[in-house]
Each structure stands twice: as C-alpha cells, then as structure tokens.
Amino acid sequence: MTKFLKCFVGLFLFIVLINSSSYAQLYRSAASGNWNANSTWEVSTNGGSGWLPAVTTPTSGNSAQITINHTVTVTANVTTSQLIISGTISINSGVVLTHPGGATFTLSSGTAITGAGTFQFQTGSNLNVRPGSNFSATLRINSGIIDVRDYSFPHIGRLYGNVIVDAGASLYTGGSIGYTLFVMGNLTVNGSIYGFGDLRFYGPSLANSGNIEPEVFTFDSTSTVAGSGSFQSNRIYMSPNGNVTLLSDVTFSPSGTGPFFEIKTGGIFSANTYIFTFNSGRFAVLPGATVVSSGTVRTQNTVTIDPRTGSGFNANVNVFSGTTTVTATASPFTCRLNGNVVINSGATFYSGHSGAYLVSIYGNLTNNGSMTGIGSSVRFFGAVLANTGSIISPVFNFDSICTVSGNGTYTSENIYIGSTGNVTLLNDVTFSPTGTGPFFEIKTGGIFSANTHIFTFNSGRFAVLSGATVVKSGTVRTQNTVTIDPRTGSGFNANVNVFSGTTTVTQTVSPLYLQIKR
C-alpha cells in the first residue's frame, strides 16, 4: 500500500508539472506604476484562466506575452516579449525598452508610448501606428526591417518622437503610395528608409549617413540637413512650410520614372555655404519659392534646373559635369539665375530647345565648358564674364556693365549688346557668329570698348545701331568675309584693321551712307 501511494503521488506531481509547463507565463499590468515593481504586475501560468500577484517583473526571459492596461513607467533597460498595449508605456530618459520583433505590434487609438527614452526594435517586425495613438518616445530600429505605417484606412501613421535607423537596419514605408508616414521628431538614418509610401518629415534635424528612398519624401518644416548619405526618392518635395538649411555638403539623386526635386511656392532652401549636388532628374523651383544666396548648387550627369518665373534662385550654380538644361518648363518659359554660374571644362549648359525659352544670368559667368541651345536665348546681366570654352547659345545678350576676358569662342547666331549693355574687354577676344544671317549687334544706348585690346570679328555682320557706341580704344580687326554696319547716329570710334578677306563697310538701312571720322 505504501509503495502504491508513493507511485500515485509521483504520478500526480508529474501531471501537475506537465500541465503547468504547457502554459508559458503571461504578464499583465494590475495597476499604474514602475515596470520593475512587482506590485505593477500580475501573472498567469495557465494561459490567462487565472491570475496571481507577480513575484518578478516581466522580461523576454520569463514571459511569452505582456499586456499593458495602465500607465507603466520604464525606469531601467528591459527586453520584452510580445507586447499588447491598451494603456501607456512611459520610458524615462536614458532608458531603452527593447522589443524582440516578430509579430505585428499595434498601437491603437488612445494608447501611447511616451517619455524621453527609447523604444527599440531588435529584429524585423511590423509597427501598426493607428490614428489617435501617441508614439512620442524615440523609435530606434536596431536591426532587420520594420514596416511602419497605419495598416488600416486612412493609412496615415504618425511618429511624434525622434526616429533612429541604425546601420544595417531599414524602415519600410509600405507597398503603395496610399500609405503616408509623418515623422515629427528628429530623424537619424545610418541604415535605410525605403518603400512605395510617402514619408513626410516635420522634425527640426535630419542626419543621413545611409540612404533615404521612399517613393515620396517631403520636407514640411524648418529643419537642418546633414550627412554624406544619399536621397534617392522618385519625388522629393519641399512644401510651402519647408525651410531647409544644410549643415554639410549633401547630394540628392532622385531616381525612378521622371524623378524630381521640387520646392513648392513658399518653400525655402539654403545650401548655407556648402555644396548641394544634384545629379539626376529635374530640380524645380516654383513661383514664390526661394533658393537662398548662400552656397552652391552643383549639377552632374544629365539633369534639368527648372527655376520658374517668379521664383528666387539666388545660389551659385556650378555645372560640374554632363549636360545641365536650365529652363523654365512652364509658361512664360523665362527663368533667372541670380547667383554666379561656373561651367566646368567638359560640361555643358543647355538653355532650351526653342525660341520660347529665355535664361537670364545676374551673377558672374565663368565658362570653361560650353553653352548651347536650340533657338533659345541667354541674357547676361552680371559684372564679369570669363570664357575659355565655347558660347554657342543661339542668342546671347550682354545687358549690363561688364568685363569680358578669356580666349574662348563666341559662335552664337545672334549676339547683342543691349541698351543697358556696357562691355569692356580685358584681353583680345574673337566673335564668330554662325548660322543663317548671323550678326553681332549693339543696340541703341549700348557701349562696347576693346579697351586697348584687339576685337576680332570673322563672320557675319557687325551692326552698331543709332545711338550705340564703339569706344575709341583698341582695334576692331576683321577677317574672312564680313560686314561692318555702323548706322547713322552711331559712334564707331575704334580703329579698324581689315586683316584678311573682304570686309563690306556699309549701312544696311536708309540713309545708305556713312561718315568715317579720323
């Protein structure tokens, strides 16, 4: 009998152990309090059928699931098991709560993760941020891919705190443009942000040493941007509320179908003494938008700069390599660059493909490459033009008091000195207008001075209209078959040297006579 009782007791204990081990421990909050206080919790070892006061606090090592029904404050670093929140988690400053990832983690309306501390995802997971929730602690994606969005209609998720994406980790913005994610705090990207959704940045600081390439990325606030990382979204916007200042050299490389970077009306962008490199797609500055006069916009590869009529494009432009088309793509197709323009050797500044396009340059112009176009016009309002390359723009206008230097070529079909133009050479210069009926024309009120140097004219017609002046300094030297056309009432005071070929000297409009004075 005794032997039988011993066997029965042993069997009973074995059954109890089997039954209890079939349920992993579940924790839930019993009251508001600190995470590391036993009194905050109760525990179930039978799948939630019964609950007892906890004698330990929950971690990933002793629980399968943790439910927050109250306000629980995290005062020391902790790694959790799967979380269900119907209350609030508050994380103290300097403290990290680490979530293991895996199953979808949902933050429903009325729930919150708050505080100055950090909520960290350790591995890949889904974060469902529903309208009415409050995720204002720092979100740190430490490893894996975290799909962050509102999974249900209206598909607008909001993160109110800072967001950090570590190297090797990724934030995914969803599988379609219908998903929008707002980031209201600072954004630090050492890994990547990608996806087909729309990410809108409202924070004061963005540091990117990784890669940002959701389908759409929008700057929506006054913010600074720094870091050597890439921006490769198909569409990059600066909204009317956007006011972005660089804190380092930054490169934008929009990619996809018809990629662009667009500053909306009211938006402001400042390179802030740094170099902003744009190397793919179209950079549009809409009417009422501003590119501040500080730093340089540097272009590479085949790109378009599209400063619309009424915009303020005040930064310097450096066409570093490839071909940069500078043209307003909307009516009236006139644009202006208010800063200096530098075109590197081997690079091309293209002013458009029809007579409707006009580019005005108000800063100094240094051309070591080429300026081309088809039918389009370039008007120069700057103080200094240095040309060691080729200016082939179909129509080129001098419209200011300026100096001209360099041994480059001028082969535009029509070259003008406008009524406000006053051009002085700093060395010998050659003009060779080419095309159908090419000419170089000084308008009424325009002034030209060879300034003791030799101005060589070797193709087309050189017209000096009534009221225009060629200053008595230096020499006009003609070559090949050309025409000099000093109109009645003009002042052609420079020396003339018919160097080679045939030079026709005649007025081409009535009265058909001219007077030559010594």
Image: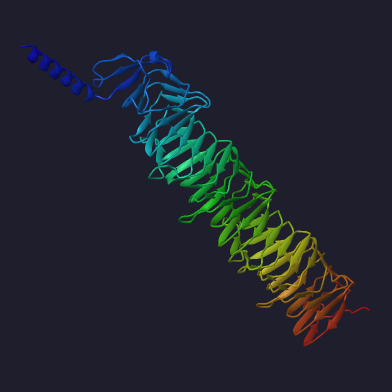
Q: Position of residue 202 (x, y in %)?
A: 54, 36
Looking at the image, which residue sits at the far right? 518
Looking at the image, which residue sits at the far left? 1
Q: Residue 119 appears in which quarter of the rendering? A: top left
Looking at the image, which residue sits at the far front? 3
Look at the picture and state if 270 lies above or below 52.
below
Is residue 308 visible in this depiction of the protein?
Answer: no
Look at the picture and state if 129 lies above or below 381.
above
The N terminus - image quarter: top left
Look at the picture and state if 235 lies above or below 320.
above
In the figure, is residue 408 to the left or right of 238? right
The C terminus - image quarter: bottom right
In the figure, is residue 256 to the left or right of 311? left
Residue, x 37% and y 30% (percent of image)? 106
222 or 210, which lies in front?
210
Residue, x 75% and y 78% (percent of image)? 461
In the figure, is residue 13 to the left or right of 140? left
30 or 422, which lies in front?
30
Q: Position of residue 249 (x, y in %)?
A: 62, 49
Residue, x 41% and y 24% (percent of image)? 111
